[in-house]
Each structure stands twice: as structure tokens, then as C-alpha cells.
Image (cartoon, helix red, strand yellow):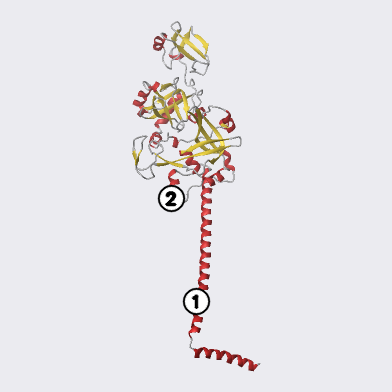
């Protein structure tokens, strides 16, 4: 149950009440929470405290344990609460790294980000918005080297850039809560210093390095359900994929600093007009539009970066290298092979308005092979069944090239044979012409002698007959 204090009573009762202590409370009013009032506890009732309320501190023997007072959410279950404003979580974690404060132009708000971990080894980003920049963030910044343990109450989960945690106006950050789970986490931190260093140095908290778990079957929706609902920010579907617009490139050249598209050529120096930095070369990033279908409907989604690389089993650099080797990626073959392989896609939907029209954009933020894919006749190597798709694609291209090479070789052999026959015929004709010229060039006596020899031979056979 939550308590509430109004106006002039706040200062006096705030000095009286201490965090984590047990009190006897009497003469307080309890009422049901209306739908418009914020809810900070599990019960839908709140206790009104004022100057007429009788409040007395309990003795040390009467203090109540608070080990089970907080319903903690494991890191692994955070995706189930993603992008749902009505669902909030409580996290017990340790802060191991701090980023500088920054200003978000789009929302016109200040924030500061921290890296948080616990025993589950699934590091995440915790964002504290400007309501917490005066008290909480200075303490965490000054004590980050000690890996302070905090309890975040009523936090939100979002998927704007990977999976991350953020505060909302009714969130609360508690430092070093006196519960058993906090003591266990402190012991774990002392024996896992190398892992914590790896989290920071290898950026294991980054979207590209986050490990995605299989969603619960109850969280997987049909495409037809998504199309019939409105303003669903994040969802899982099980679908097959085909690349839309195969004639388009599956990568673009971007700034390595801000990932904005640039007009510079690959491996040429350029200056980015967005982040105002110079770079030796733009970075090729994968991005393409795909059609996802599951038998109940289909939708178009953008696939980029980590998810695109997972599906194509290649990077942007690999695509450029393949083009330079004259063996470019073939979307048509990919579409033919991938239609047999279902995947689990997590999508994030965003809406924008331009000139009075609302545009919807679906972006794939996670991709996993479907569970039953392992029972098919295909063998899945690497991290997903897409490896098989790409390998089949590459094999088909190689087979086609081999057939072309064989056909070219046979054609060359046929041409060579024809040329050889023509050469032989020309040589025979040349010999005949040479013999004829030789006969014509013989002196008359010799030609007569040859004729007489033939006549002599004919006469000799006639006499024998």
C-alpha cells in the first residue's frame, strides 16, 4: 500500500519518517485509488497521512523484515515489459559505468546514462532523465568506482536502441537497500571483477552485443492481430521473409560516427556535415526492406545492422568485396531459399505525420531462428538458419558460375575443333593447288612420259586379259 502526504504536512512528516524503518500508524485515512491517480504500490489503496495521524517508531525487536517487500524483475524478463507504458518493473542492480550527461534535441530534455549489471550477466543501459539529475546522478557519478548497488522502482523498458531501462516521473532510485539480495549481489561483484571490466571494455551493453533470449510462446502474435491493433510499439511474430525490391542495394555508405548516410565514395576521406568530424572512409551498413508473412497476413519492415548481418551472414564490407570480385549478393536466390525457413522477429513500430498523413514504420530489432527450424532437413550452422540460406545462395552462384565456365570451355573446344577442321581443309586445298601447279609447271616431255606410262600399264593389263 502506498502513503501520501499533502502540502504543509510534507516537511514535518518527512523529518519524522525514515526509510526502511517500521512504525505504528493510527488515525490515518485509507481510500481506494482512482484511475487518474498514480499507483506506486501493488495494492489499489492509499493511506493519507497528516498532522493528526498518530505515528510511532517500533522498537528494534519489532522491526519488520523487508526482504520480500519488493517484487524484483529479473533482467531476462525485461523484454516482456518493453514499450508498454502501463507496465513498470523493479530492478536490483549495480552501476559499473557512467556516461557524460547529454541533451536530446528531439525531446528537448537532459539525461545521463549508466551501465548496470547483476548476476544474470545481461548488462543494460539505465537512463536517468532530468528529474534525477540533481540528486541521484551526482551520487552515482562520484561512487561508480565502488559499483554501488541500487534498487530502481517503477522503471520503464524500451527498445529504441536495443533493450534499455529508463526512469519515468514516478520512478524512485534507492541506494544500497538493506535486503538479502543486495548482499548477495555485492558478493558476486567482488568475485567477478574481470567480467565487469569486460562489460565496459568490450561494450557488452551495446545493442550489437546484446544476447536475445527466445520469447515466450504467449508473446508471439499473428500478423493479422498486429494489423488489426493500433499503436502497438513492440511485438514478436513468427514469419518467413523475402527481400522487397531485389533490384535495390542491401547496404549504404554511412558516417562511422553518427551512422548518417553520406555521399562519399568507399575508402575516400570525407567530412560529415551531421557530426562535424573527418573520417578516412565511410562505413558500409546493411539495410534493406523486407516483406514478412505468416499465412495470416504480411507487413513490410526495415532490417538493418546486426539483424541484417545475421540474416545475410555478411557485413557491409563483405558485400563490397563480393561486388569487387564480381560475385555480388543475389536477392532473388535468397528469396527462393529463405521462403522455407521461418524466423522469430521482434519489431518496433513508430509513427510520423507529414502534411496531415500518418506514416507507419516497422523496424526489426531482434531476429532468432524459429524453434522448429532445427527439425527440418536443413542443417543450421553458426547462430541461425540464415547461414544455410546464404550458403545455399553461394553454392547456387558457384554452381551457376561452374556451369558457365564448363559451357564456355566446351564452346572454346568446339571453336578450336572447328578452326582445326577449317585449317586442315585449307591445308588439303593448298596441297591440291600445289600439286596442280606442280603438274602444270612440268615440261612437256615429262608430262608425255607420264601419260605414256599410264597407257603402257593399261595396255599391259589388256594383254593379260
- Is 326 in front, or is 1? 326
> Residue 31, position in %: x, y?
52, 11
Query: How many callouts does the rendering have?
Result: 2
**Which residue does the image show at 51% across and 66% down from the upper left?**
416
Relative side of 294 to 423, left or right:
right
Residue 425 placement (x, y as % from top left): 53, 73
Residue in the foreground of this view, choosing between 283 and 48: 283
Residue 370 visible in rendering: no
Q: Going by the image, does 440 lie left or right of 8?
A: right
Q: How many residues crowd around disc 1 within 10 Å: few (fewer than 14), some, or many (20 or more)?
A: few
> Which residue occupies the extreme right position in the image?
465
- For the C terminus, give its image quadrant: bottom right
Report how far apart the C-alphas of labels 2 and 1 lie in the structure: 50 Å
357 in relation to 313, above or below = above
- Please determine whether, in this image, residue 358 is positioned above or below residue 420: above
Q: Residue at x 51, y 63 (%)?
A: 412
Residue at the limit of the structure toward the top, as seen here: 52
Q: Secondary structure at mark 1?
A: helix
Instruction: Give the foreground label among 2 and 1.
Output: 1
Residue 21 shows in this picture: yes
Q: Which residue is mark 2?
A: 324
Foreground residue among 57 and 355: 355
The residue positioned 43% from the left and 50% from the top of the image is: 324
Badge 2 or badge 1: first in the primary sequence: 2
User: In this picture, is 407 found above or below 81?
Assistant: below
Q: Quadrant of residue 144?
A: top left
Q: Position of residue 47 (x, y in %)?
A: 49, 11
Q: Position of residue 137 (x, y in %)?
A: 37, 24
Query: Which residue is disc 1 drawn over?
Result: 430
Q: Residues within 10 Å of mark 2 (few under 14, many from 20)?
A: few
Amino acid at each position: 500500500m502506498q502513503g501520501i502526504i499533502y502540502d504543509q504536512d510534507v516537511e514535518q512528516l518527512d523529518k519524522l519518517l525514515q526509510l526502511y524503518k517500521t512504525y505504528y500508524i493510527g488515525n490515518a485515512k485509507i481510500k481506494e485509488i482512482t484511475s487518474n491517480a498514480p499507483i506506486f504500490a501493488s495494492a489499489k489503496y492509499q493511506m493519507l497521512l497528516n498532522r493528526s495521524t498518530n505515528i510511532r517508531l517500533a522498537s528494534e525487536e519489532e522491526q519488520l523484515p523487508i526482504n520480500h517487500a519488493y517484487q524484483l524483475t529479473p533482467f531476462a524478463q525485461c523484454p516482456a515489459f518493453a514499450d508498454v507504458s502501463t507496465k513498470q518493473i523493479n530492478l536490483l542492480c549495480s552501476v559499473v559505468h557512467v556516461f557524460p550527461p547529454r541533451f536530446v534535441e528531439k525531446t528537448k530534455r537532459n539525461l545521463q546514462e549508466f551501465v548496470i549489471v547483476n548476476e544474470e550477466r545481461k548488462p543494460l543501459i539505465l537512463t536517468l532523465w532530468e528529474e534525477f539529475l540533481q540528486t541521484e546522478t551526482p551520487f552515482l557519478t562520484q561512487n561508480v568506482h565502488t559499483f554501488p548497488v541500487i534498487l530502481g522502482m517503477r522503471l520503464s523498458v524500451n527498445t529504441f536502441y536495443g533493450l534499455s531501462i529508463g526512469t519515468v516521473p514516478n520512478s524512485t532510485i534507492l541506494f544500497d537497500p538493506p535486503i538479502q539480495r543486495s548482499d548477495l549481489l555485492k558478493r558476486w561483484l567482488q568475485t567477478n571483477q574481470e567480467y565487469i571490466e569486460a562489460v565496459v571494455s568490450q561494450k557488452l551493453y551495446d545493442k550489437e552485443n546484446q544476447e536475445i533470449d527466445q520469447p515466450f510462446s504467449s508473446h508471439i502474435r499473428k500478423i493479422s492481430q498486429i494489423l488489426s491493433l493500433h499503436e502497438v510499439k513492440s511485438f514478436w511474430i513468427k514469419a518467413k521473409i523475402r527481400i522487397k525490391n531485389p533490384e535495390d542495394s542491401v547496404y549504404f555508405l554511412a558516417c562511422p560516427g553518427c551512422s548518417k548516410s553520406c555521399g562519399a565514395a568507399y575508402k575516400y576521406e570525407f567530412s560529415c556535415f551531421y557530426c562535424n568530424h573527418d573520417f578516412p572512409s565511410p562505413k558500409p551498413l546493411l539495410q534493406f526492406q523486407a516483406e514478412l508473412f505468416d499465412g495470416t497476413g504480411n507487413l513490410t519492415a526495415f532490417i538493418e545492422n546486426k539483424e541484417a548481418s545475421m540474416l545475410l551472414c555478411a557485413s557491409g564490407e563483405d558485400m563490397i568485396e563480393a561486388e569487387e570480385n564480381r560475385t555480388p549478393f543475389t536477392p532473388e536466390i535468397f528469396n527462393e531459399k529463405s521462403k522455407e525457413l521461418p524466423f522469430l522477429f521482434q519489431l518496433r513500430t513508430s509513427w510520423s505525420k507529414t502534411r496531415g498523413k500518418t506514416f507507419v514504420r516497422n523496424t526489426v530489432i531482434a531476429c532468432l531462428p524459429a524453434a522448429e527450424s532445427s527439425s527440418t532437413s536443413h542443417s543450421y550452422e553458426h547462430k541461425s538458419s540464415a547461414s544455410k540460406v546464404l550458403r545455399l545462395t553461394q553454392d547456387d552462384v558457384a554452381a551457376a558460375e561452374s556451369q558457365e565456365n564448363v559451357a564456355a570451355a566446351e564452346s572454346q573446344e568446339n571453336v578450336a575443333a572447328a578452326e582445326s577442321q577449317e585449317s586442315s581443309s585449307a591445308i588439303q586445298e593448298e596441297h591440291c593447288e600445289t600439286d596442280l601447279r606442280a603438274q602444270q609447271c612440268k615440261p612437256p616431255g615429262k608430262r608425255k612420259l607420264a601419260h605414256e606410262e599410264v597407257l603402257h600399264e593399261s595396255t599391259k593389263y589388256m594383254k593379260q586379259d
